[in-house]
Image (tube, grey):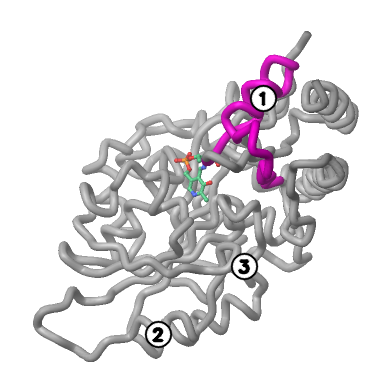
Amino acid sequence: MRPIDLRSDTLTTPTPAMRRAMAEAEVGDDVYGEDPTVNRLEEEAAALLGKEAALFVPSGTMGNQIALLLHTHRGDEVWLEAESHIYWYEVGGLGSLAHVQPRLIFGRNGKFGPQDLEALREPPDIHRPRPRLLCLENTHNRAGGVVWTVGEVEEVAAAARRLGLAFHLDGARLFNAAVALKVKPSVLAAPFDTVMVSLSKGLAAPVGSLLLGSRDQIGEARRWRKLLGGGMRQAGILAAAGLIGLREMVERLEEDHLHARILAEEMATWPGLNVDLSLVQTNIVKVTVAREDLDGPALSARFHEAGVKVSALGPRFIRLVTHKDVSRRDVEEALRRMKEAYRA
Ligand code: TLP
């Protein structure tokens, strides 16, 4: 039985067109700035997201970490939502790499408003770290793929400006947000100083993310990338797949969103599981296990045995992520297998 893998959209494999483009990619040494395919990817991404410049980085984690390094000095304060990826899943880089101190915003389903920022404002005081940077995540991963709308982002951006904070977007799944809202990604990216987007999730490239911002910031980011060991030489082989991701794989995300909806609507009817359907807005389904006799890891293990892989992201919560390697038929088969295992 072939397992159906719903753990993450990072599991997507490159398309045949990507593999062909990778084999044929024109390459050079990107540390010298001489890889034509990387340069093309960076130019196209900058145009698509409405920023002056872009930098191809090996991972979303590196893109976010470089943003922290760009905007802050050691000892500064970074404001970010309590469930955000930068806080939860970047191996403590806030402290160990950027030497900054997080100030957590306890959001509602990953989101917050200007009033939450105003509540954190303090008068200048020699005892306190300097607040420098605000980060926001769109879509929000741990909240279950929740989308920030353009208006919500703009309101928070205005508050950040009032507070003198730089503004960074963890847009690992920004294209999912854009497709769900039917807006251009550049509109969602506009209020931010820097933006990270991933090519290796729903867009199916094997490796890579982009950090975008002003020409000066990206010039500086290039130095940080080199320091972190992310200068990749003939990286055009990878960028070739990323270009196809940007050009051909964005619109189809709609299909993943539909599949998430199908999973969510069915699982919401299973007694003992809670799925807030209003939060199922993109390709992630967050399921809360509300049974005494079963927790998230145990349920995930049971599904796994039945041939469906999901992630347990906490004692009471599992996550299912749809992506291009999961077809409509796979979704139906996954539901069949999980239902049987759940009832047992
Ligand atoms: N998320 C991964 C894991 O790290 C949890 C996943 O499976 O969802 N920002 C956001 C919002 C992300 O979801 C991720 C990856 C990243 C940044 C980091 O990207 P990579 O994995 O390329 O370092």
* Label 1 neighbour load within 10 Å: few <14, some 14-19, many 20+: many
Q: Which amino acid, by three-letter code, is at mark 2?
A: Ala
In front here: 77 or 161?
77
Residue at numbered disc 3: 186
Image marks 1 and 3: residues in contact by CB distance under 8 Å: no
Residue placed most toward the observer, 261 or 17: 261
Task: Determine the secondary structure under disc 3.
Answer: helix
Q: In this view, does 275 lie above or below 77?
A: above
Q: Do the residues labelled 2 and 1 touch (CB within 8 Å)?
A: no
- Residue depicted at x 16% and y 65%: 75
Is disc 2 surrounded by few (<14), some (14 to 19) or many (20+) residues within 10 Å?
Answer: few
Pick whichever of labels 2 and 1 is earlier in the sequence. 2
Question: Residue 166: horizontal and vertical position, in percent?
Answer: 36, 75
Q: Is residue 294 in the magenta section?
A: yes
Q: Which of 199 and 114 is in front in this view?
A: 114
Residue at left offset 36%, top offset 69%: 79
Distance Cα–Cα, label 2 vs label 1: 41 Å
Bounds of the magenta span?
Answer: 285-314
Q: Is residue 57 magenta?
A: no
**Of the numbered discs in the image, which one, if any, rests on residue 290?**
none
Q: Can residue 47 be seen in this view?
A: no
Residue for badge 1: 309
- Residue 306's place in the image compared with 138, above or below, is above
Q: Position of residue 163 (x, y in %)?
A: 35, 86
Q: Name the residue under label 2.
A: 119
Mark closest to the chain's N terminus, 1 or 3: 3
Q: Please state the horizontal and vertical placement of residue 105, each as a whole percent of the image.
A: 43, 69
In the rendered image of this protein, does residue 235 appear above or below residue 276?
above
Disc 3 to disc 2: CB gap under 8 Å: no
